[in-house]
């Protein structure tokens, strides 16, 4: 196990900004006993109904903002868009659009949207991508990002900057054709357009450029909040498209983007559902479980993802006012899908399952069912009602099989029939 841990640490540190000496635990017998905060802890009373919970929700959001993710700005700014590319794709089954979106007239981001043609759009998906919009689909007309992106594989990227060859390199993760065939639109934006993913990234991102417009000090929020807030701004644009006005909007995100998606949906109730894929530590997984990644390595390697002060909970997880089942509860009663991968023990699949299961308490307040299974399901068995959970064999990635499961969930989001 020690050797596996060492290999894992070395592997996981490939995109690290600082080295952590942390040794992850992968032994279920060594998980400490913990008790989880109750939904009502924040208001000092037992929550018995939706109106009590709706009041407590605001307080939980505040405490997440002050202790972990930082502020999710609420001040309205101007969001305008200009269409740069519009063309039919996939033999006319869909239309590809690329917009240049201007935030407060100061910061430009690129949003790509694939919209089914000749059929009403059943639902729309939105997700942050890691490496630029041209990586999600193979089409040379998609602008190439000039930002520092997370990918760095040669010959597609040099020093984390994409070149023309990067086009379509992440298309397996997005499965645009599968999504279009199912009747859904798919939108994507690069996290780097809001903040590049390194500690000083905030200096040229929304936190700095829009500090006066949003009336928030850059230090009072984090990269995670910047990405989550960026999703909300993209929703402002999508909501102006006539063919999408009344469709359900489903957020999805993998790993660090899964964390950002959960935080976005907790704050912005216009998102009708969330698919959090292997979101792990700082996402769906319980923070109190000392299994896989912990607060120490995540805050050492990625100090910009959360408020600096969040690091004080490393080794002191029991003093956290919340745990991540509360974050998931903040999404109730909207449908939620938590997905894991067996070889992705770093993200603590069991911690993701237990958190999703515990969030069911909030769903019950709305007379919605969560996960009734006591134990983790076998691989490739979808469990739960309004909260779904699934784990598949294999590694930390999003693949075609994952999408098959997401495409079982989305029709239920559309019909409300769980
Ligand atoms: C890892 C990090 C995880 C996860 C992952 C990813 O290095 O430790 O929390 O976010 O990156 O985003 O792929």
Image (cartoon, rainbow, N blue to C red):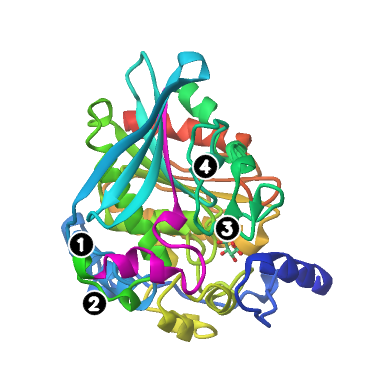
Q: Which residue is mark 2?
A: 44
Q: Is residue 120 above or below residue 225?
A: above
Q: SS for tag 3?
A: loop
Q: Earlier in the sequence, mark 2 or mark 4?
A: 2
Q: Which residue is mark 1?
A: 74
Q: Is residue 276 left or right of residue 366?
A: right
Tell me the quarter of the image containing the N terminus.
bottom right
Q: Position of residue 324 (x, y in %)?
A: 43, 65
Using the rendered image of the protein, determine whether residue 44 is visible from the camera's viewpoint: yes
Q: Residue at x 46, y 15 (%)?
A: 92
Residue sitting nearer the eye, 287 or 85: 85
Q: Mark 2 and 1 residues: CB-CB less than 8 Å, in contact? A: no
Q: Is mark 3 within 8 Å of ligand 1?
A: yes
Q: Residue at x 66, y 47 (%)?
A: 156
Q: Earlier in the sequence, mark 1 or mark 4?
A: 1
Using the rendered image of the protein, determine whether residue 331 is visible from the camera's viewpoint: no
Q: Is residue 10 left or right of residue 384?
A: right
Outermost right residue: 3
Callout 4 environment at 10 Å: few (<14), some (14 to 19), or many (20+)? Answer: some
Q: SS for tag 2?
A: loop
Q: Check residue 383 in the rendering and tell me which mark sits there, or answer none.
A: 4
Q: Is residue 338 above or below residue 32?
A: above
């Amino acid at each position: 196990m020690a050797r596996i841990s060492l290999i894992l640490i070395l592997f996981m540190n490939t995109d690290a900004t600082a080295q952590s000496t942390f040794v992850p635990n992968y032994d279920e017998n060594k998980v400490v006993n913990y008790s989880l905060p109750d939904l009502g802890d924040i208001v000092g009373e037992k929550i018995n109904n939706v109106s009590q919970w709706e009041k407590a929700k605001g307080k939980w959001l505040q405490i997440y903002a002050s202790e972990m993710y930082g502020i999710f700005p609420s001040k309205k700014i101007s969001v305008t868009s200009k269409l740069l590319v519009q063309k039919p794709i996939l033999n006319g089954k869909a239309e590809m659009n690329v917009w240049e979106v201007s935030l407060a007239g100061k910061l430009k981001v690129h949003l790509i949207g694939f919209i089914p043609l000749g059929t009403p759009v059943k639902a729309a998906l939105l997700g942050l991508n890691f490496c630029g919009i041209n990586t999600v689909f193979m089409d040379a007309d998609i602008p190439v990002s000039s930002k520092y992106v997370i990918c760095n594989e040669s010959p597609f990227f040099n020093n984390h900057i994409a070149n023309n060859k990067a086009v379509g390199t992440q298309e397996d993760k997005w499965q645009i054709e599968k999504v279009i065939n199912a009747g859904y639109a798919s939108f994507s934006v690069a996290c780097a357009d809001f903040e590049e993913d390194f500690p000083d990234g905030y200096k040229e991102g929304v936190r700095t450029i829009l500090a006066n417009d949003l009336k928030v000090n850059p230090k009072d929020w984090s990269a995670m909040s910047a990405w989550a807030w960026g999703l909300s701004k993209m929703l402002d644009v999508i909501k102006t498209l006539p063919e999408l006005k009344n469709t359900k909007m489903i957020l999805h995100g993998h790993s660090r983007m899964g964390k950002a998606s959960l935080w976005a949906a907790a704050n912005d109730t216009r998102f009708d559902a969330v698919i959090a894929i292997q979101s792990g530590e700082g996402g769906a997984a319980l923070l109190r479980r000392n299994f896989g990644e912990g607060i120490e390595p995540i805050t050492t390697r990625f100090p910009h993802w959360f408020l600096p002060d969040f690091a004080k909970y490393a080794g002191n997880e029991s003093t956290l006012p919340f745990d991540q089942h509360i974050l998931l509860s903040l999404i109730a009663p909207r449908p939620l899908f938590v997905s894991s991968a067996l070889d992705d023990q770093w993200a603590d699949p069991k911690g993701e399952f237990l958190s999703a299961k515990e969030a069911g308490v909030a769903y019950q307040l709305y007379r919605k069912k969560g996960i009734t299974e006591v134990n983790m399901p076998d691989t490739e068995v979808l469990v739960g009602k309004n909260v779904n959970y699934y784990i598949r064999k294999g590694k930390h990635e999003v693949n075609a099989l994952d999408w098959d499961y997401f495409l079982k969930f989305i029709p239920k989001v559309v019909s409300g029939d769980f």
